[in-house]
Amino acid sequence: MRSLKPPDTFHLSAAIGWLGLGNHLEANEDLEKITPALRAHPDVLEVRYDIYARAKKWEACVDIGNALIQAVPNRASAWIQRSLASYFMKRPQEAYDQLLPAAQRFPKLWTIPYNLACYCAQLGRLEECKEWFAKAMAVDEKMVRQAAVDDPDLAPLWDNMGGTVWKRAG
């Protein structure tokens, strides 16, 4: 795949800037200025995913995630984004199935076992949820504690275990 060069890099940067300002519509306008043959570039697709996620176009986000995984299977964000889109469509089993292969591929990322724990909690598979949560904690305890403290996706786990997050996590 060809690399992005000016002016396409300028349009991509502008789109990222608009997203930072909370304006996904202007971000989309800038992405549309990118050379059509380069709109499937992984960097462009990642920004397109963010635009569609802000618009809650989850089906399109799954499609973008699939395209990203095909183009750059070693980008963990593609695997995570695709599964999150499925999850936001109220398909936790699909999200779990999509993310599971990434657990072995990216063992040093806490977000993958953490998200798998969340999906398991929502599916009522609490023992498996505990296992994934423990794996996430083993990778980065501080970040997992910060994420878990107010995460409603883990409520079934906390309800089952009782106590505080700090006791739950240990």
Image: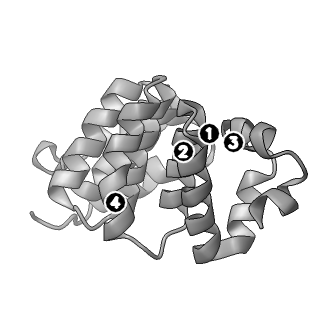
Q: How many callouts does the rendering have? A: 4
As drawn, the label of residue 154 is 3
- Viewer-side residue, 74 vs 150: 150
- Viewer-side residue, 82 vs 163: 163
Estimate the spatial distance between the alpha carbons at disc 4 and disc 3, rounded to whole Å. Answer: 20 Å
At label 1, counting other C-alpha atoms closer than 10 Å, the crowd grade (few under 14, some 14-19, many 20 or more) is few
Which amino acid, mark 1? Gly
What's the residue at 14%, 42% (across, down)?
36
The residue singled out by tag 4 in the image is 102
Q: Which percent across, then down, holds residue 14?
A: 45, 52
* CB within 8 Å, label 4 to label 2: no
What's the residue at 48%, 52% (across, down)?
16
Q: Which percent across, then down, holds residue 124?
A: 58, 33
Which amino acid, mark 3? Leu
Q: Is residue 160 above or below residue 168?
A: above
Q: Is residue 149 above or below residue 111?
A: above
Which amino acid, mark 4? Ala
The residue singled out by tag 1 in the image is 22
- From where the camera sits, is residue 145 visible? yes
Estimate the spatial distance between the alpha carbons at disc 2 and disc 3, rounded to whole Å. Answer: 29 Å
